[in-house]
Image (cartoon, rainbow, N blue to C red):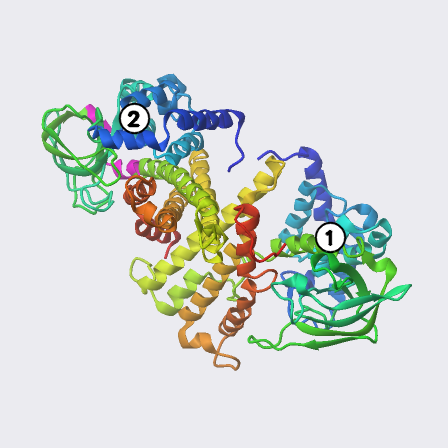
Amino acid sequence: MAVLTEEQSMLRDAARSWVQEKSPVTAFRKMRDSGVELGYDATAWNEMAEMGWAGVIVPEEYGGSEFGYLSLGLVIEELGRTLTASPLIASGLGAASALILGGSDTQKSEWLPKIAEGTAIATLAVDEGPHHAPEKVALTAQSTRVGYSLNGKKTFVLEGMAANLLVVSARVSGQPGDKAGIALFLVPADTKGVTRQKLSLADSRGAANIAFDNVLVPESAILGSVDGGYALLEKVLDRARAGLSAEMLGAAVQAFEVTLDYLKTRVQFGQVIGSFQALQHRAAKMFTELELSRSAVEAALTAIDNDSPDVPELVSLAKAKMGDTFHLVSNEMVQMHGGIGMTDAHDAGFYLKRARAAEAAFGNQAYHRDRYARIQGY
Amino acid sequence: MADFGGTDLETFRKEVREWVEGNFPKALKGVPNPMAREERGNAPSADMETWRKAVGAKGWGTPSWPKEYGGGGLSAAEARVVTGEFNRAGAYNPIGGMGVMMFGPTLLEYGTDAQKLEHIPAICRGEIAWCQGFSEPGAGSDLAALSTKAVDKGDHFEIDGSKIWTSGAQWADWCFCLVRTDTAKKHEGISFVLFTMRQPGVEVRPIPLIAGSSPFCETFFTGARAEKKDLVGPLNGGWTIAKRLLQHERSGLTGAGGGLGSGGKSLEQLAKDYVGHDDKGRIADHDLRSRLVANAINMRAFQQTAVRAMLEAKGNASPSSATSIMKNAGTQLIQERHEMALEIMGHQGLGWEGDAFDADELAAVRGWLFGKAFTIFGGSQEVQSNIVSKRILGLPDLTQSK
C-alpha cells in the first residue's frame, strides 16, 4: 500500500466501509440474478455518486474534488474487492479523462458537472473488433457542410446501454491501422442513427455493440483537434487502463484472501488443507505476485498524477502484470476450492469471469507486453 | 519528496565532494569494488590501500553506524549523500564484505559494549575479513540441525566439527559461528560465538563449483578455541541472533539489478545483436522477445516493490510485508535473465575458456552457472516460501522450522 495522504486515507476508508455495508458480493449476485439491462444497480450508483466518487478526478470548477488518479484508484480498488458493478470506470474515469484532457471549456461545462454528480453516464467507444486495437479505426467521419457524418460500428462498449454520452474514435482520413487521421467525437447516445445492442457477457457487466448509421454531429462535437485524436486517445486510454488495473488489484486481493481462508478451514485427511506444502507454496507465489502487482499499479497511477513522461510504459507494465496475476489468482481460487468452486452458488466463478473480462478490456497482457517492448525500443 | 535537512545537507554534500576529490586516487576511477570479486587472492594495490584507509578513518564506508564504534554516525539522508558522491566520482566503497553486510549490524544489536568496541571499528576500517560458520553438511535448509560442538573448558570453548559453504573462509581473519552447546535441545541448544581463523585447529578447503573456482569452502574445526568473552548473547541463545543475521543476509541477496557480466549491454540489446531485428527494431525471434519483455516487466515491478517497501518503512511503524517476497522474486528473475543471455548467445554462449569467445560470452556462462546458487544460499527458495506461508499468510507449519 502506497503511503497515503490524510484525504486519501479517508477516501479509501469511506469506500471500504461502504463496500462492506452496502455492496458485498451478494449485491452483485442479486444484480446478476435480476437480469437488469444496465448491468449495475442504479440505487447503489446514486449512493456512490453522492459520496463524490464519480468526480474524484474532475476539477473543482466542474463540480469534482480533483483528488487525482491514485485517489480514484483507491476507491476503485475497494469496489473491485466485491466486484461492485458500476459505471465509475467508464464514466468517472475513462470518459471524464477524455473531457478533462481534450475538452473545450464549453464541452467541459456541459458534461463534466453531470458526470461528476453521476446524473450523466459517459463512456469510451473505441474498439471495433474482438481485440483492443485503438488505431484500427474503420468507423468513418465524413465532413459535411455543418459538421460530420459518422458511419461504422463499435464493439464491447463499457456501460454502452446506460451511457448518455459516447466518446467515439473515428477516422477522418487514412486507413485502419494508421495513427494519423483519427479524431474523437462527443456523441450523445440519443442522436439519430445510433443503435445499441446489449451484450450478455460472462461477467454480467453492462456492455453494448453500437452501430452508427449516418450519425450527424456538429463541428463542435470534436474533442481536441481533428488531427490529434490518436495522441489524446492514448492518454485517455492509459488513464482507463491504470484505473481498471486498480479494480483488478482489489478483486485479485479479495479472491486470494477468500482462498487463503478456505485453505485454513477446509479439512481433508484429518487436517486443514493449508498445511500441505504443495498448496502453501502456491499461496506464497500468489502473495508474491500480488505484492509485485500492487507496486506496478500504484506506480502507474502515481505517474499519471505527476504527469510523468513514462506514463505509457508504466501503465502497460501495470496492466500486463496485473492481468497475469488476476489470471493466476482467479484460476487458483477455483482450483483450490475444488468442487465447491465450480458451483454457481460460490463466488469463485464471479472472480474468474470478471478476471477474463478485465484482462481483455483496454488491451490484454499480450497487447501490453508488446507495447512495453516497443516503447523500450525492442 | 521532501528532503529533510535542506541547506545543511547541501553544505554536507559540498564537504563530501571536496573530500572525495582530495582523497580518491584517480587511478581507481571506475574500478569495481575488489571486495565484490570472487578472486580476492591478489594483494590490493597501494592505491586501493590508500583509499580503504581514508574511507575507513572517516567511517564513511559504514556511514550510518555509530561514531563511537568507528562508523560515520550519519543520518540516512547524509549517508545517501556519501553514496551519491562516491558514485559521482566513480569511486567504490572500499569497506564491505560479510562484516559490513551481516555481522556488524547484528553485533551492534546484540553485542555487549566491550564486544562492539573490540570488533566494530576494525570492520569500519576494512581491516578484518569475516566469514560465516552457519551451514553444515547435515544442516542446510534445516540449519538448526547443526552439530558442530562447543564444549565449555572453563576459560574458553573448544570447538569440534565442520562447516560448509563458508564463503571467503580462505581469506577470512575471523569467523562468526553457530555452535551446539546443548545436545538435548534443538533451537535452544545453539550459541553464537566468534573466533579467529588464524589458529591451529582450523583447516579450510576451497570447493570448486560447477562454475569453476569459487569463494566457498569447507571448514574443519579440531579443538579450535573460542574465548568466553566472544560468546554473543546468552549461552544457548544463538538462534535468535542467527535469524536476525539471516534477515540482513537475505536483504542483501535479492539480486535486484544484479549484473549479467555482459559489458553493460542490456539483454535486449544483446538479443538484437545476436538474434537480429526487423525493420521496426523488434527482436526477430518473437518467442524470445515475449519472454524478454515478461521478465523485464517483472524486474521493473520488483524494483518498484523495493521502492514501495522503502517508502512504507519510512511512513509506517510496522515493516512492509512486501520485503518477505523479495529474495525469491529477485533471484528467480535474475536466473531467468542468465538463462536468456545464454540462449541469446547460442553456441557462443557455451564457451568455457579460450579466445574463441569474448569476455562477455565467457562471463555469461560462468554467471549462469554461479547464479544457480542464488535460489539455494541464504535460505533456499523453498525455505523462503515456507517462511511466507507461515509468517505472512499464517498457514500451519509442518516443518517446525523457525
Residues shaded magenta: A220-233
In the image, residue B9 above or below residue A95: below
| Residue B386 percent across, percent down from the top left | 54, 55
| Picture residue at 32% right of the left edge, 20% below the top | A46
| Residue A299 percent across, percent down from the top left | 46, 41
In the figure, residue A256 lies in which quadrant? top left
Classed neighbour count for the residue bearing mark 2: other residues with Cα under 10 Å, few (<14), some (14–19), many (≥20): many
Q: Which residue is mark 1?
A: B106
- Callout 2 amino acid: Gly
Q: Please check the rendered image and state whether residue B371 is part of the magenta-colored stretch, yes or no.
A: no
**Marks 1 & 2 on one chain:** no
Q: Which residue is mark 2?
A: A103
| Picture residue at 87% right of the left edge, 58% below the top | B229
Q: Chain of mark 2?
A: A
Q: Please check the rendered image and state whether residue A227 is part of the magenta-colored stretch, yes or no.
A: yes
| Picture residue at 18% right of the left edge, 39% below the top | A155
